[in-house]
Image (tube, helix red, strand yellow):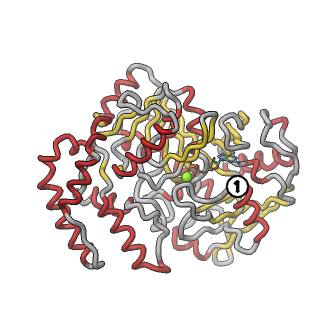
């Protein structure tokens, strides 16, 4: 079985939480895109963990975790993340962590580039996490990036690095900034021990598949942040969609059997860009969702923008992900709201629309809401769909019907066992 666990919305849907839960039945978990701009929070009996680069399967000792060629890896961050998890008692060895030789290294100058550019943009900024992700993906496609496999023989890689740094400094100098090539080389040398984890992960995954192993692909961010299909330019710089999973994992010949979309029971968005369902005028709703839902970025600590569930955007996200089934998360957060708004359509130039428009047209869209009855009962311990209050069942059933995708799981709390199979 090969399952992709992917985000339907703007990210932070609770992918890490669902990967941690469902990886019990999997042998391998692969991250196939993105870098340490990801923040996947997992709460289980071992504690609370925020994972940025490591796949969320790392907390299960019997699961092998793979970081695929589609990822960009900040070595310094990875070094810190491994140390942090090891200190919390998690075992990480070349046996249970495998990094693609073709994954690209996110360099200190990429981070610097990200920072100076966001500063230049001032109020027009994109809301980058300033971790160099955009610049390093650009370098990758310019074919000016170092890769994990280069750590094997840094002597051989040195001249290329110096040429790249010379080129990079042409840009940085325009921002009154610069990096020293020797420092960059030393930085690579310092973390070159991470080569211990490097292998041809495509070959590893192909063999695992041949041997009947269950493989899970873990996405970062959501469909609306996908570089191709998302709300450009307010996207991430990689493909967050399930169709990219076999490519970013290095096994394009493998097919994903199930695309499991993780969808939040309301909307949140970190960073800039149009967000039609944002609860700008409804301060009470905003405060409820942000405080009860703890909506602050896991990677950055920034308060997340919040609003009602968006049928138009979610249906688009489901199509982009080719989702076969859905895990609806954070339903418990809605407990206590008297009326629950749902954005069922947009108004664009006086017309009601239900298909997701071109990115720039989103700025002119106004949300059209329908209101559902709320509930007051604590649902965080509920184990079956029938036990949910009637209003909660109605809400879930409405969303399932409106988005035209089967809801298989409902998450009612951050902890591993707080979920319902519908
Ligand atoms: P990811 O980036 O998709 O993995 O999601 P994040 O970890 O950034 O954000 C999800 C947050 O919600 C985390 O803090 C989770 O611990 C928490 N969470 C996940 N599922 C639930 C749920 O069903 N209920 C509640 N209350 N919290 C949840
Ligand atoms: Mg997150």
Residue plotted at (24% across, 60% down): 142
Return the x and y of residue 85 as percentages of the image width and height: 48, 40
Q: Is residue 400 left or right of residue 233?
A: right
Q: Vertically, is 254 above or below 163?
A: above
Return the x and y of residue 318 as percentages of the image width and height: 58, 49
Q: Vertically, is 373 above or below 153?
A: below
Q: Residue furthest front?
A: 87
Q: Which of these two is toward me, 198 or 177?
A: 177
Is residue 74 in view from this perspective? yes
Residue plotted at (51% across, 27% down): 26
Residue 244, located in which quarter of the rendered image? top left
Query: Which residue has dot 1 on it?
Result: 293
Return the x and y of residue 185 as percentages of the image width and height: 20, 55
Return the x and y of residue 232 as percentages of the image width and height: 46, 66
Q: Which of these two is toward me, 40 or 181?
A: 181
> Cβ(mark 1) to ligand 1 < 8 Å?
yes
Residue plotted at (81% across, 52% down): 335
Q: Is residue 321 left or right of residue 95?
A: right
Is residue 311 in view from this perspective? no
How many numbered discs sit on the rendered protein?
1
SS label for mark 1: loop
Q: Which quadrant would the C terminus be assigned to in this image?
A: top right
Dot 1 crowding, Cα within 10 Å, few <14, some 14–19, many 20+:
some
Residue plotted at (53% across, 53% down): 222
Q: Which of these two is toward me, 242 or 418?
A: 418
């Amino acid at each position: 079985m090969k399952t992709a666990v992917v985000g339907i919305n703007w990210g932070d849907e609770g992918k890490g939480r669902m990967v941690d839960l469902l990886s019990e039945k999997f042998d391998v978990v692969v991250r196939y895109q993105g870098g340490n701009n990801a923040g996947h929070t997992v709460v289980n009996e071992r504690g609370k963990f925020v994972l940025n680069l490591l796949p969320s399967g790392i907390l299960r000792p019997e699961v092998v975790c793979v970081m695929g060629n589609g990822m960009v890896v900040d070595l310094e961050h990875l070094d810190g993340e491994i140390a942090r998890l090891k200190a919390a008692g998690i075992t990480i060895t070349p046996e249970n962590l495998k990094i693609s030789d073709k994954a690209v290294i996110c360099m200190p100058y990429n981070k610097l580039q990200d920072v100076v550019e966001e500063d230049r943009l001032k109020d027009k900024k994109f809301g980058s996490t300033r971790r160099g992700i955009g610049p390093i993906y650009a370098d990758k496609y310019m074919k000016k990036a170092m890769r994990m496999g280069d750590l094997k023989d840094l002597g051989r890689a040195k001249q290329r690095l110096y040429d790249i740094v010379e080129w990079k400094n042409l840009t940085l100098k325009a921002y009154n900034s610069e990096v020293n090539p020797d420092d960059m080389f030393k930085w690579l040398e310092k973390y070159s021990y991470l080569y211990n984890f490097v292998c041809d992960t495509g070959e590893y995954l192909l063999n695992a598949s041949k041997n009947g192993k269950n493989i899970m692909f873990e996405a970062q961010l959501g469909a609306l942040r996908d570089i191709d299909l998302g709300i450009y330019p307010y996207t991430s710089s990689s493909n967050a969609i399930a169709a990219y999973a076999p490519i970013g994992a290095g096994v394009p010949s493998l097919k994903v059997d199930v695309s499991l979309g993780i969808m939040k029971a309301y909307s949140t968005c970190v960073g800039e860009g149009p967000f039609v369902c944002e609860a700008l005028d409804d301060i009470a709703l905003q405060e409820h969702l942000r405080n009860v839902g703890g909506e602050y970025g896991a990677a950055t600590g920034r308060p997340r923008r919040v609003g009602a569930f968006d049928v138009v955007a979610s249906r688009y996200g489901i199509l982009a992900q080719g989702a076969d089934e859905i895990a609806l998360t954070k339903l418990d957060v809605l407990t206590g709201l008297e009326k629950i708004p749902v954005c069922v359509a947009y108004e664009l130039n006086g017309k009601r629309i239900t298909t997701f428009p071109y990115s720039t047209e989103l700025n002119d869209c106004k949300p059209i809401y329908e209101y559902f009855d709320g509930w007051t009962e604590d649902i965080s311990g509920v184990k079956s769909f029938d036990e949910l209050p009637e209003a909660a069942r109605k809400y879930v059933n409405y969303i399932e019907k409106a988005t035209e995708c089967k809801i298989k799981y409902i998450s009612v709390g951050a902890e591993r066992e707080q979920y319902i199979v519908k």
